[in-house]
Amino acid sequence: MKGLLKEFSKGIFRENPIFVIALGLCPALAVSVSLENALGMGLAATFVLVCSNFIISGIRDIVPSQIRIPCFIVVIASFVTIVELLMAAFSPQLAKQLGIFVPLIVVNCIILGRAESFASKNRILPSILDGLGMGLGFTLALSFVAVIRELFGSGEILGFAVNKAYLPATIMILPPGALLTLGMLIGLTNLIKSRSRK
Amino acid sequence: MDLKIVLSIIISMVFINNFVLSKFLGLCPFLGVSRQIKPAISMGLAVIFVMTLSGLLTWLVYRYILVPLDLVYLRTIVFILVIASFVQLVEMVILKKSPVLYRALGIYLPLITTNCAVLGVTVLNINTFFINGKAEPASFALSLLQSFFAGIGFSLALILMSGIRERLDLADVPHSLSGIPIAFIIASLMSLAFMGFNGFRF
Amino acid sequence: MDNKLLLSISPHVHKGESISRIIWLVFFSLLPVGVAGIFIFGPRALWLIVACIVTAIATEAIILLLRHKKVTIIDGSAALTGLLLAYNLPSSLPIWMACVGSFFAIAVVKQAFGGLGRNIFNPALAARAFLLIAWSKYMVNFTQPICTWAGFTRPFAYPDSVTCATPLALLKEGKAEGIYQMGINYLDLFLGNRPGCIGEVCIVLLLAGALFLLWRKIISWHIPLSFIFSLGLLTWFWGGSQIGKADVLLSLLSGGVVLGAFFMATDYVTSPLTRKGQLIFGFGCGLLTFIIRKWGGYPEGVSFAILMMNGAVPLLDRFCSPRIYGHLTRGRRHSV
């Protein structure tokens, strides 16, 4: 039981996909404009990650090694298509805001990376927990960046104005602000890591 | 085909909506290959090639297979399979025809498959030049143009970044910022500079 | 291994001057323009200049302390960055925004890259672009000069809150075709009787400072000349409704061209090392400035143009380096 818990929790802090391993950075920058978008994207990616980890772990003994990558991609792409259709049906607003990044979940390095390095080599239950943990870590990291950007860039959180007197710095919700925020946060993570190692 | 539209697409793809610096597509290879100038130039050329031809192939597939058969929802899966197969094919051909070229470019080609930028430009072409499944006039040529200059934009950002990072190797960057954080900070300043072209109008 | 084998970037040949001396000379050559700016735009300009310089120096001191390095604020580079940033701001900007910009310039654009001599982008210009995009409404909030050389009216009053457009903005919006429709003449442009940023309007004092630096051989003519020449030529060709009809003098004397070409593009750290590279750099700046002014959304393109060329400088240095005696030329290279 402890081992399983560890598979789940490592994705949140120690091996956080965005801040520590530095995967899945493309959506982290584009989608973190507002907290709402970040949560939506995180949820969608987690769904795809868990489902594809489940299937890939299940078929890991059947798939020949040479064509494993295309097989993984087909599995992942199918779940992404499901997510695309669900989102278009139930929250078209979110689908429009996430735009091109919903189909791009297919090439999200995190999902393919976990499939290749974990799910294809481990049993089903650990794979599901790994997917859940990584997805949660991804969502948390994404939300962290989004909170900073939305707060400083539009003075709101989830659409609610925080301080009427603050003049928002528009640059934070634009690309340069995104790159700057993420760069600083990863730098901060590195600093914390090196301090805790001493 | 209006010259104004052509020029707008060029400026948009290279500067204002630069795939790496504005749209954030293709960051993984961007960060990975931009440490030195020579590999960056090779990667840039490979990306331009793959993006242009993928744009061409996926346009054909969408127009003549997916739309008539009403399979538009399979777009994502089909496109990525087309791109992956195409890149695999190109890699095999290069390996056979010119081992020298393969050694220069070959390792980057598989990297390009999972490059968000390639899938991104193919989807962008569809979103821009198809309305409700119907192709706009001249959409083939415009899609090709858009794919080519998206590649140029990516390569420009990549090569500029590689020059800067080569120089920074000798500088005294704070330890926790070295590697990815400083690359992001450089990218943010480049993105800031490119925003000078905002509001472009001919 | 001790530090006898120290690897550093070029140049490796040194003249007798120290970096600190050069920086302070540039600083003092820019002071007259600042005084003129305060005179023209009022005491608010003084507060902006002071705030920028103080924030810059404080930021640099704190960061150097945190990094356990020698606190070298006495070399004047932080002060110079603060001064140049203030010169690029409108006098009505809220002071706290100027402080944020100054902090950004030193902390992110300069110190994150390794400190003095290591930055790629010009800190003052990058901060100005940052502020422009962050708080665009406040960065284009220009006011009329409250005090002109012609009449010493109300020498120390605060400006009216009526905003007005700079000459370039008027040209861009098509509200004025030539200089006389803007209500000013060329002498006004030279002396600074026009709305604009604190340190960019008084052309005559800028040129005086630039001539001083040229005389002392602190800057060379390559970058400013190629910048201004290319911008002037392109404006003459395509700037107006017909070839040769554009007002080249107006476009060269308005906006930040003189300040940018002589003081910001010539910054040692962010400009090319070789003469050939410098000429290409200058032409590139002129070309990009013209493109942004003519077709881009912003009326003024100097800051962005210089920033973009800053990004290209490492490549320019790499590919424009002089041929080393004994090596084969590119075309006949047998082994690398």
Image (cartoon, coloured by chain):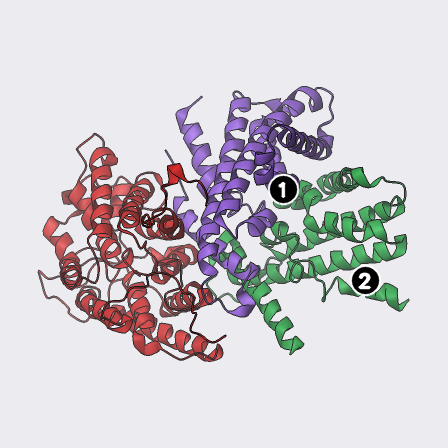
Chain colours: A green, B purple, C red
Estimate the spatial distance between the alpha carbons at disc 2 and disc 1, rounded to whole Å. 34 Å
Would residue B17 be seen by someone viewing this image from the given angle? no
Q: Residue tagged by mark 2? A: A8
Task: State the image coordinates of residue B104 (x, y, percent, origin top left).
Answer: 56, 40
In which chain is the residue bearing label 2? Answer: A
Q: Are marks 2 and 1 in contact (CB under 8 Å)?
A: no
Q: Is residue C88 left or right of residue B191?
A: left
> How many marks are shown on the rendered structure?
2
Q: Residue tagged by mark 1? A: B107
Q: Nearer the viewer, mark 2 or mark 1?
A: 1
- Tell me the residue at 72%/43% (across/down): A87
SS for dot 2: helix
In which chain is the residue bearing label 1? Answer: B
- Pick whichever, A91 or B138, lies toward us: B138
Task: State the image coordinates of residue C313 (x, y, percent, origin top left).
Answer: 37, 52
Task: State the image coordinates of residue B118 (x, y, percent, origin top left).
Answer: 60, 37
Specify the quadrant of the image occupied by residue C236.
top left
SS for dot 1: loop
Task: Identify whether B55 is placed above or below C8.
Answer: above
Work out which quarter of the rendered image holds the N terminus of chain B and state it. Answer: top left
- Tell me the residue at 15%/68% (across/down): C154
Q: Are the residues under badges 2 and 1 in a single subunit?
A: no
- Tell me the residue at 22%/56% (across/down): C262
Q: Is residue B72 left or right of residue C106?
A: right
Q: Amino acid at mark 1?
A: Ile
Q: Amino acid at mark 2?
A: Phe
Q: Is residue C55 left or right of residue C214?
A: right
- Tell me the residue at 57%/66% (across/down): A187
Task: Identify whether B171 is placed above or below C242.
Answer: below
Q: Is residue C44 left or right of residue A162?
A: left
Would residue C13 be seen by someone viewing this image from the given angle? yes
